[in-house]
Every structure is written in structure tokens, then in C-alpha cells.
Image (cartoon, grey):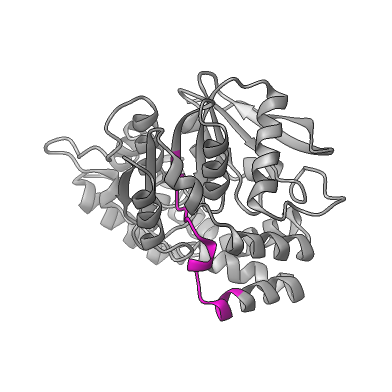
């Protein structure tokens, strides 16, 4: 699995500097376009880096920061329409020199990816939509949308914590605080509010109806940020699209059971069945563990003691010990070392 250091590059797109990075080799897969990101800070997140690295085993993964946030030019306004977003993506594809590519559109990035695929059908090989939607107004009621935007604009500290709770329901207090700080570094209050308002305005229904390329829609059943029904809506609009229901409530694909996302994506891009593979006969599947147990097991496999795990995850040592005991029972292994060995075999 690639674990290379990314090199951030800059291209002039629509008269502004756009930061982008790539890792891995193979057919290009452009990932991203969500409402707020930061190439440098994202890469420091071990979950994010592991997610991208898993995709990069077979593909060249390209990511970029939208104008107005992250490492891209922040001197002007953020894109204000789907057409603006698609123009940025198209300009970047042209600047990089990509003749053809596949797209992984996550969250609001799904609208951007669909818009580009509809505008440049000969250039896009396959489309993966994760946690996406067709019509932003369907995400929440008008009152809820306005309240969230207002909190972000007027009280970015509180707003960033509200969004952290929404996007990362399984996170620890320390993880929520870290993500809230990340958001405040990625964008100003004004830019964040404008980007969020755009996410609610975006509409890809017309574009989705025109698509004929192979399309995979992945959506977690209990996603709190973008309801599962909106993923079903996306799949219903694209002719021949495959919908794969994933378990969990985390919105970000690199959290929770990220392997289910990367396995389904890799299988689909390679022309295989994108549904998660069943566990081998007589052996447990990683999905038998809760997201918290999987995180504890990852740290066990890294050689951390219960006390160290407790400090990192903001838990009591007793709770960590109970998690380890539950993990051993679920995996049917006799010891902590055996659990660590199982995690290594599963590339957990």
C-alpha cells in the first residue's frame, strides 16, 4: 500500500491558483470536491491517509482544494454555482493534462462530479458517488439550513463543532475538537458559510438523468449528514446505476468501516462486483467489530498498551480493557497478540 509523501502542486484555473496533489500510479481517479478541505492538513490524518493510500494501490489519486479554501487561492470568492464548480474541475483536468479519468464524488462533490461527467461524457470512464445527493434542498428543512449557515457565519467556533458532531457521530471529544480546529484552518467563517449555502443550493438532477456511463452509488445506511434516501435518489436518476448500501453512520468515507468503501470502489473500477465480500467460511469479518472496537484493535496492533489507548481515545483504561475482551470474543482468538495478528492480516 503506498505511503508516499504527497507533493502539492499549483495550477492556474479560471485566473486563480488551485492547489492539487496526486499519489499512486495507474489510471487517474479524481477524488474530492467537497465543501471544505485542506490538502496539507488532510494528509496528516492517519485515517484519511490510509483511505487514499488504499485507493492508490491501483490508481493515481488526484485531489484538489477548491478556490477559497485550503491551500488554494483565498483572495477571492468561492465558486458560487454548479457551473463554477464544474469549470474549476474542468480547468484543473485540462491543466494536469488528463485525457480521461474516473471520478469519486463524495458529499457535495457528487454534484460537481455528475456535472462534469454530463458536460464531458467522452472524458469520464466511471463515476463513484459516495454519501452524495442530487438536490441540496432535500438535505434538511429550510429553517434547519438557514440556522446552520447562520451559526457557521456568525459563530464559526460553535458552527465548526456543530458540523463535527454531524459529520463524525462516532468520534471522541478530542477528535471532534481536532476536526473543528481543522475546519477553522481550512476556511474563514465567510467562506465556510458561502460554501455550505452553495452545498444546499446545488442541483444535479438534470445532469444525473443524462448519464450513461457506469455509475456506482455508495451510501451508509445511518448517515446523519446526508440521509440514505438521498443516495437512493441519486441511483434512481442514473440509468443502470448500482446502489450499494453500507453499514454505519459516519459521513466521511475514511471513518468507520473505510475498507468497505475502498473495496467496493476498487472492485467497481476494475469491473468486478462492488458489493462487500462475504467473510471466509469459518472466519470473522472486520464488519463484525463496531467502529470503536476497530479503532481500539488498530492501536492494539500498533503495540499500544491499554493505558496508552485510553489516553489517545479519551477513554478509561477499564473501558479499553472491556473493548479488547469483546474484540477477542468476536474474533474467536485466545490472546491480545492473536488479535493483533488478525488485524495485520486484515490490513486493519
- Nearer to the camera, 225 or 210: 210
- Which residue is farthest right? 75
Give yes or no for residue 116 being in the magenta stretch. Answer: no
Q: Is residue 311 visible?
A: yes
- Which residue is farthest left? 282
Number of numbered discs:
0
Horizontally, residue 59 falls left or right of residue 213, namely right
Residue 147 position within the rendered picture, expressed as x and y whole percent measured from the top left: 63, 79
Q: Quadrant of residue 248?
A: bottom left
Q: Quadrant of residue 33?
A: top right
Residue 41 position within the rendered picture, expressed as x and y whole percent measured from the top left: 68, 46
The magenta region covers 128-145
Residue beneath the point at 76% across and 76% down: 154
Q: Is residue 44 visible?
A: no
Residue 193 position within the rendered picture, expressed as x and y whole percent measured from the top left: 71, 66
Horizontally, residue 287 falls left or right of residue 212, namely left
Residue beneath the point at 73% across and 26% down: 95
Residue beneath the point at 72% across and 55% down: 80
Amino acid at each position: 500500500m503506498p505511503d508516499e509523501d504527497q507533493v502539492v502542486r499549483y495550477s492556474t484555473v479560471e485566473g486563480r491558483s488551485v492547489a492539487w496533489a496526486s499519489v499512486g500510479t495507474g489510471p487517474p481517479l479524481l477524488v474530492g470536491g467537497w465543501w471544505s478541505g485542506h490538502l496539507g492538513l488532510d494528509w496528516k490524518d492517519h485515517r484519511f491517509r490510509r483511505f487514499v493510500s488504499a485507493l492508490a494501490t491501483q490508481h493515481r489519486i488526484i485531489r484538489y482544494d477548491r478556490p477559497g479554501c485550503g491551500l488554494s487561492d483565498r483572495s477571492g470568492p468561492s465558486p458560487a454555482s454548479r457551473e463554477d464548480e464544474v469549470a474549476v474541475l474542468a480547468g484543473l483536468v485540462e491543466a494536469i493534462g488528463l485525457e480521461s479519468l474516473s471520478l469519486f464524488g463524495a458529499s457535495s462533490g457528487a454534484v460537481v462530479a455528475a456535472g462534469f461527467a454530463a458536460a464531458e461524457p467522452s472524458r469520464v470512464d466511471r463515476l463513484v458517488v459516495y454519501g452524495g445527493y442530487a438536490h441540496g434542498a432535500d438535505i434538511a428543512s429550510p429553517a434547519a439550513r438557514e440556522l446552520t449557515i447562520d451559526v457557521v457565519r456568525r459563530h464559526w467556533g460553535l458552527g465548526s463543532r456543530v458540523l463535527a458532531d454531524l459529520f463524525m457521530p462516532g468520534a471522541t471529544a478530542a477528535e471532534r475538537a481536532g476536526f473543528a480546529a481543522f475546519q477553522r484552518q481550512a476556511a474563514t467563517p465567510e467562506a465556510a458559510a458561502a460554501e455550505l449555502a452553495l452545498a444546499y443550493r446545488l442541483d444535479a438532477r438534470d445532469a444525473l438523468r443524462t448519464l450513461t456511463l457506469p455509475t456506482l452509488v455508495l451510501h451508509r445506511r445511518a448517515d446523519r449528514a446526508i440521509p440514505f434516501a438521498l443516495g437512493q435518489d441519486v441511483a434512481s436518476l442514473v440509468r443502470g446505476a448500482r446502489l450499494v448500501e453500507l453499514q454505519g453512520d459516519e459521513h466521511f468515507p475514511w471513518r468507520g468501516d473505510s475498507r468497505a468503501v475502498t473495496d467496493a470502489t476498487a472492485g467497481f473500477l476494475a469491473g468486478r462486483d462492488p458489493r462487500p465480500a462475504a467473510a471466509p467460511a469459518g472466519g470473522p469479518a472486520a464488519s463484525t467489530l463496531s467502529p470503536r472496537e476497530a479503532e481500539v484493535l488498530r492501536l492494539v496492533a500498533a503495540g499500544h498498551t491499554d493505558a496508552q489507548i485510553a489516553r489517545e481515545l479519551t477513554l478509561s483504561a477499564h473501558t479499553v480493557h472491556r473493548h479488547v475482551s469483546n474484540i477477542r470474543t468476536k474474533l474467536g482468538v485466545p490472546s491480545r497478540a492473536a488479535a493483533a495478528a488478525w488485524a495485520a492480516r486484515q490490513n486493519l
